[in-house]
Image: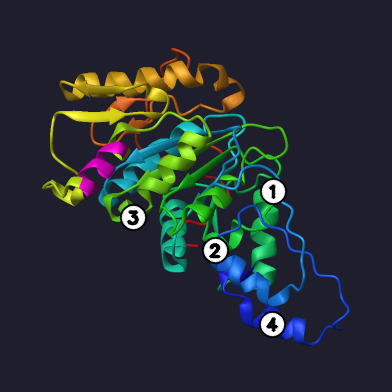
Amino acid sequence: MLDMGFEPQIRKIVDQIRPDRQTLMWSATWPKEVRQLAEDFLKDYIHINIGALELSANHNILQIVDVCHDVEKDEKLIRLMEEIMSEKENKTIVFVETKRRCDELTRKMRRDGWPAMGIHGDKSQQERDWVLNEFKHGKAPILIATDVASRGLDVEDVKFVINYDYPNSSEDYIHRIGRTARSTKTGTAYTFFTPNNIKQVSDLISVLREANQAINPKLLQLVEDRGSGRSRGRGGMKDDRRDRYSSGKMGGSNTFRDRENYDRGYSSLLKRDFGAKTQNGVYSATNYTNGNFGSNFVSAGIQTSFRTGNPTGTYQNGYDSTQ
């Protein structure tokens, strides 16, 4: 609540409570900014930390990062949703950065027949409760949300999280993807990462490595380009057929001689590292396109083709496309 802008309200409440109170604070992350604010409310406190101090995501979440351009997001999202909606367990949260983007994307998806609803801070409490109830009961299995829904939202059977917009901090990224894989369950998080997010690339790579996730070589390329100041192609990514990746669980340093080998390399890494996690729909979007290179995320050797056009069937029924 502190890092979402509720500091004035919290201070007002604290000022009206007896000074001999007991104050407890809980957080999945403990960034510097929140720590400084919390210390204003705590006196002679005891800090108990469970787990590592560095940023850490739930290891039961398969994290897939697509390095792409902003103009590609809509098409990639639709292709991904076509695969997800074919799954028996398909409850999905799509995170965006602004309330305006939330409303625009919700309208667009509903107009095209998708069972989507949106939630953000400008909606009334009654409307938010109704939307969450529809989502929890599967009547609208796609929830498009700003970060207001990433804190305190506890829906047991969320199977997928999609970061349509990457958040401003990696702490928010961890909070977002933590909406899936609740308790001992598993889940999948897809992230669209653009060159505009380059300030967060190092933190994201650290989170992926800590969770033993395969790292998209294009993320490491962004780090390399940023450090060397080399010229970049459209949208800030280097237009080069020789892409490098190093360290992490990929083992050493490798150079792909062309894009075909580049695609095959990342695809085989995902298959090798996550073959055991593909059951129960955890890794169901088996042909999800990786960046501009057209590679497929292969799930235990199973290939499925993208369906084209707008979704049809029961998910179109009962939804007013004008809403």
Residue located beneath label 3 in the image: 199
Kindly report which numbered mark, 2 or 3, lies closer to the viewer in this rendering: 2
| Residue 79 highlighted magenta (yes or no) | no
Question: Which residues fall within the magenta stretch?
Answer: 220-227
Q: Which residue sits at x=41%, y=63%? A: 101
Image quarter hosting the N terminus: bottom right
Looking at the image, how many numbered discs can be counted on the residues?
4
Where is mark 1, residue-wise? 136
Q: Which mark is residue 32?
A: 2
- Residue 117 appears in the figure: yes
Q: To which quarter of the image does residue 59 belong? A: top right
- Looking at the image, residue 123 lies above or below residue 180: below
Q: Amino acid at mark 4?
A: Arg
Q: Residue at x 13, y 39 (%)?
A: 239
Asked if labels 3 and 2 touch by Cβ distance under 8 angstroms, the answer is: no
Residues at circles 1 and 2 in contact by the CB criterion of under 8 Å: no
Q: Residue at x 22, y 19 (%)?
A: 261
Q: Residues within 10 Å of mark 1 (few under 14, many from 20)?
A: some
- Measuring from the top left, give residue 278's x and y in whole percent: 54, 21
The residue singled out by tag 4 in the image is 11
Q: Classify mark 3: helix, strand or loop.
A: helix
Q: Secondary structure at mark 1?
A: helix
- Give yes or no for residue 226 being in the magenta stretch: yes
Q: Is residue 13 above or below residue 69?
A: below
Residue at the limit of the structure toward the top, as seen here: 301
Q: In 3D space, how far apart are the residues under numbered discs 1 and 2 (Cα atoms)?
A: 34 Å
In terms of secondary structure, where does tag 4 sit? helix
Callout 4: few (<14), some (14-19), or many (20+) C-alpha neighbours within 10 Å? few
- Asked whether the residues under the numbered discs 4 and 1 touch, taking CB atoms below 8 Å apart as contact, a structural biologist would say no
319 left or right of 8? left
